[in-house]
Image (spheres, rainbow, N blue to C red):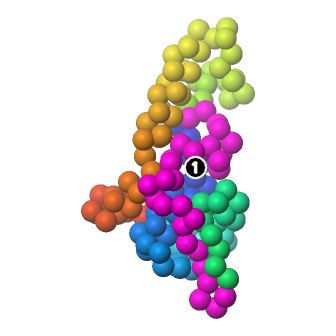
């Protein structure tokens, strides 16, 4: 299963901002709370802003706020936006395989990818925030 470092950082970023409700959160705070470096956090923030997940607030007390409700930020869509719709499970035989029709395990691998995506569609950033609130999920890597 592929959840890239960038996607993990994005989930953490959105969770940190979301748990702060409507408060403006600085990149420094986001980086510290999500345990990613500030430069990497800034890079991911730019992508999140490009896809309208967050809004930048300029000024001395600037930072970021969510541009959508946490319950509207679907994990599958977020992963698609950030990672260009990659399959969650790679071919076991060949790194460059794209699950061609002639492969003997193609159908089941394709179904497995679809099932994983369906599970991801059920989760939102709100689920991660609730996990943090209840101590079920930490933000540290």
Where is residue 52 shown, x and y percent of the image?
Answer: 64, 60
The residue at the point 53 percent across, 28 percent down is 113
The residue drawn where x is 51% and y is 57% is 11
Q: Name the residue: 61% across, 84% down.
A: 62
- Does 138 appear above or below 57? above
Residue 3 position, x and y percent, is 55, 45
Quadrant for residue 87, please give it: top right
Where 2 falls versus 36 (above or below)?
Answer: above
Q: Is residue 69 visible?
A: yes
- For residue 47, say whether it is visible: no
Above or below: residue 40 compared with residue 4: below
Tell me if 101 is positioned left or right of 127 in this view.
Answer: right
On screen, residue 126 versus residue 8, left or right, reads left
Picture quarter containing residue 57?
bottom right
76, 27: nearer the viewer: 76
Q: Nearer the viewer, residue 69 or 49?
A: 69
Q: How many marks?
A: 1
Residue 103 falls inside the magenta stretch = no
Secondary structure under the numbered disc 1 in the rendered image: helix
77 above or below 45? Answer: above
Residue at image location 51% in from the left, 16% down from the top: 108
- The answer to if 85 sits in the magenta stretch is yes
Rate crowding at label 1 as few (under 14), some (14 to 19) or many (20 or more) other CA atoms within 10 Å. Answer: many
Whole-percent x and y of residue 21? 43, 72
Q: Position of residue 110 (x, y in %)?
A: 56, 21
Query: Which region is colored magenta?
Result: 59-88
Residue assigned mark 1: 78
Displayed quadrant of residue 48? bottom right
């Amino acid at each position: 299963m592929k959840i890239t470092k960038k996607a993990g950082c994005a989930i953490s970023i959105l969770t940190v901002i979301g748990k702060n409700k409507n408060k403006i959160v600085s990149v420094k705070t986001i980086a510290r709370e999500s345990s990613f470096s500030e430069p990497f956090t800034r890079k991911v923030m730019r992508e999140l802003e490009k896809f309208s997940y967050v809004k930048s607030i300029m000024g001395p007390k600037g930072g970021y706020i969510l541009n959508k409700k946490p319950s509207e930020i679907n994990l599958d869509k977020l992963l698609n936006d950030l990672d260009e719709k990659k399959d969650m499970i790679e071919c076991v035989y060949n790194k460059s395989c794209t699950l061609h029709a002639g492969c003997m395990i193609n159908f089941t691998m394709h179904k497995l990818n679809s099932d994983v995506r369906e599970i991801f569609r059920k989760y939102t950033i709100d689920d991660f925030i609730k996990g943090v609130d209840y101590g079920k999920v930490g933000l540290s890597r």
